[in-house]
Amino acid sequence: MAKHGCFPSVLLSLAVLFTAGLLGGRSHCYVEASEEDGLTVEYGRKVVGEFMTETGFYQSIMVNDNSPLVNFRSKYQDIQVHESSYYGKILVLDGVVQLTERDADSYNEMMAHIPMMAHSAPKRVLVVGGGDGMVLSEVLKHPMVEHVDHVDLDEGVINTCKEHFSWGKAWDDPRVTLHIADGAAFVRDAPAGSYDVIVQDSSDPSSWDENGQEVILPSSVLYSEYHLKNLVRALSPHGVFNFQAETFQLPSDLKGISEWRDMVLEVGFESAQYGSLTISSYPTGQIGFLLCKKCSKSGSSTEDVEHRFREMVQAGTGTTYYQPKLQKSSFDLPLWVEKSIYGEL
């Protein structure tokens, strides 16, 4: 869900740097941001955006004049749906962009298909978080799947996405059981060996306030050692776990990636690899995931992945971002990132 530690621009009262124009003819100027209907206004246009206090980076998306289409507060967070002429509908939680119709495929397809293809026969799957439903809809494209438990705390997000996004019928699949519950508690209480694949599409464990101070969020429990131990126990002997692991473009996130990898190896996973993807609507344009295996030698062959992918395409449930080549190449990282995560090569 919330995929990056940043400060939502709707709360800012400072001048922001706005970039306009095409490649080769860009103009840069400082624009005083104001607020209208909970949205930041730049150049007289409504935008949703985020300010990265750690790096000073700011990014925004212009939205249509009729935005927001949805604007209410659930028991847990502010929920908005905006609309952009380029990005389509945009889901925003607590001022942070979660996904857009334009590029939701990149993050959600990689979060789902990389771990599903990494298991040779994924029959029972658990999705923790991901209340927007797109990871769930991608998991269901695999015909081997017999049952999926989807656990999310905020029913308000689920009901909103059922109504406003094309994949909203995913919960109607008879293989799915939806649990409105705490994800950490659900995993804690799951019988040992319950799942072949677990995908955790959760909120960030921390964020930053307007003073540049780190704020620990309730979802931090999903990144704790105790929760990770429970995940190992809940997985079958050849089980695979994939979770949202931030961007390597922010120093604090890169440090966190290395720490999380060390932690998952300590609690019992035999391997943990950081994979990367590109997505233009997220600040820095890059985010990643940690693919963790209980048995490092288990998995699918290249031929098997390609065969299963062809079956999905032939069934009319293909992808637009994920392809079999990414099953390996997404783990090829810039040298400085590899050194930071894995140590000297």
Image: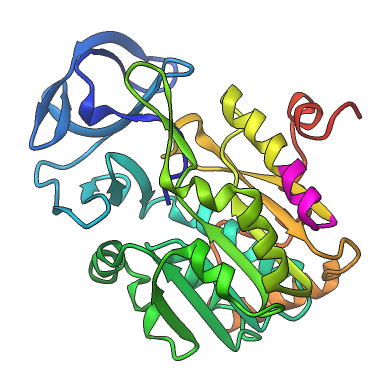
**Could you tell me which residue is drawn at 66 percent across and 71 percent down?**
197
Horizontal side of residue 65 vs 118, given as left or right: left
- Indicate whether 126 appears above or below 246: below
Residue 103 in the image: state x and y as whole percent: 44, 50
User: Is any atom of residue 311 visible in this view?
Assistant: yes
Asked if 39 appears above or below 228 in the picture, the reply is: above
Measured from the top left, where is residue 37 in percent x and y? 8, 37
- Residue 263 in magenta stretch: yes
Colour scheme in use: rainbow
Q: Relative to residue 119, is residue 28 drawn left or right?
A: left
Q: Main secondary structure of the magenta part?
A: helix
Question: Where 290 sits versus 199, above or below?
Answer: above
Residue 191 or residue 284, whichever sits in front: 191
Q: Decide if residue 316 is in sight here.
A: no
Residue occupying the point 24% across, 45% down? 85
**Vertical arrangement, residue 126 with respect to residue 67, above or below:** below
Q: Quadrant of residue 258?
A: top right
Q: Quadrant of residue 104?
A: bottom left
Residue 79 lies, in percent from the top left, at 23, 52
Image quarter (top left, top right, bottom left or bottom right) of the C terminus:
top right
Q: Which portion, as a residue range, is magenta?
A: 261-270
Q: Residue visible at 70% across and 77% down?
A: 192
Image-based side of 168 in relation to 299, left or right: left
Taking the spot 25% from the left edge, 69% from the top edge, the residue there is: 159
Image-quadrant location for residue 169: bottom left
Q: Is residue 291 magenta?
A: no
User: How many marks overall?
Assistant: 0
Residue 179 is situated, as x and y percent measured from the top left of the image, at 41, 76
Name the foreground residue: 21 vs 195: 195
